[in-house]
Amino acid sequence: MQQVETCEELRNLLETHRVLARSIGLVPTMGALHAGHVSLIKRAMEENDVVVVSDFVNPTQFNNPNDFRTYPRDLLSDGKLVESIGATIFFAPSEKEIYPTPDTRQFTFGNLDKVFEGAHRPGHFNGVGQIVSKLFELVQPTRAYFGEKDYQQMLIIKDLVRQLKLNIEIVPCPIVREADGLAMSSRNQLLDSECRREAPIIYATLKASGELLKTKPLAEVREWAIQQIEAKAPLRVEYLEFADAETLQPLAEYRPEYTRCLTAVQAGAVRLIDNLGY
């Protein structure tokens, strides 16, 4: 593995591989790597000759300065993990390297960024567009790998590729969960003991909702699901909605195989997101 910190170093390394017509896989991360990231890296290694793992906590996608400040960071541990897996390049740039000047570009994603995370975190997806487009330009990957835990983000990145007319395959990868069902996230390590104990109710409720949808009205299932989660004292539902799996527009009734439930839950000081398709 080669660890690089500058865009110039990265371009030079990748040019060597391009001359040999090698396929390039990109796994963009914000660090604090866990088993979910490992699954993305391993899949990228199976499907490409060269794998680049980026590790950068992108400031432009945080609309809460405190969230940016407290976001877990452990670059040394991340580098050792990526090396142990066997990825080709570990790209760990500074903020100044990525943003030598302010990025003032504005992206629009139709209705995709008007709901869920887009509605609750103004500017978040514009920041995602900024950093992902920069990484795509730098790496020019054959394929890029994104976990479905950030389901809305994955759809938006697919739209970004379409808008920019990029020849990049976006590869969605299944959510990796803890043994008790909690979706793996870098933020999980910030949960206090009570919130960590109660947080698995989120996934349990999403699973149970899928069964209830077969016999009960969607609106009734939604209210039940919110009550189930909020019955656990430290948890508060920010949103929980059933939406079209492709457009993310709200559904009035259950449509098998086209329905996705997306939720954000405040667990003490930590905000957790999860989703499940039915």
Image (tube, grey):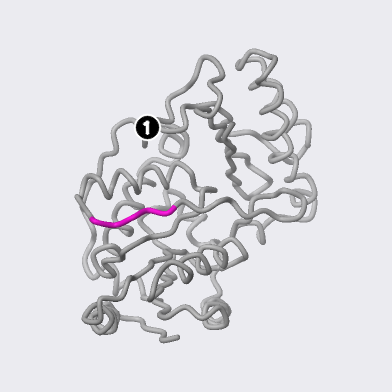
Query: Where does residue 240 sit, x and y in percent of width and height?
Result: 58, 30
Q: Where is residue 198 in the image (x, y as percent from the top left)?
A: 78, 44
Whether residue 60 appears in magenta in the rendering, the answer is no
Image-quadrant location for residue 115: top left
Decide whether residue 168 is among the magenta residues: yes
* In the image, residue 132 above or below residue 197: below
Residue at numbered disc 1: 114
Q: On screen, 41 above or below 188?
A: below
Front residue (pair 216, 229): 216
Range covered by the magenta-colored residues? 167-171
Characterize the magenta stretch by its predominant secondary structure: strand
* Residue 46: percent from left, percent from top: 48, 69
Quadrant of the drawing holding the N terminus:
bottom left
Instruction: Classify mark 1: residues with Cα within 10 Å, few (<14), some (14-19) or many (20+).
Output: some
For residue 229, side relative to residue 276 (left or right): right
Which residue type does callout 1 highlight? Lys
Point 39% across, 30% down: residue? 247
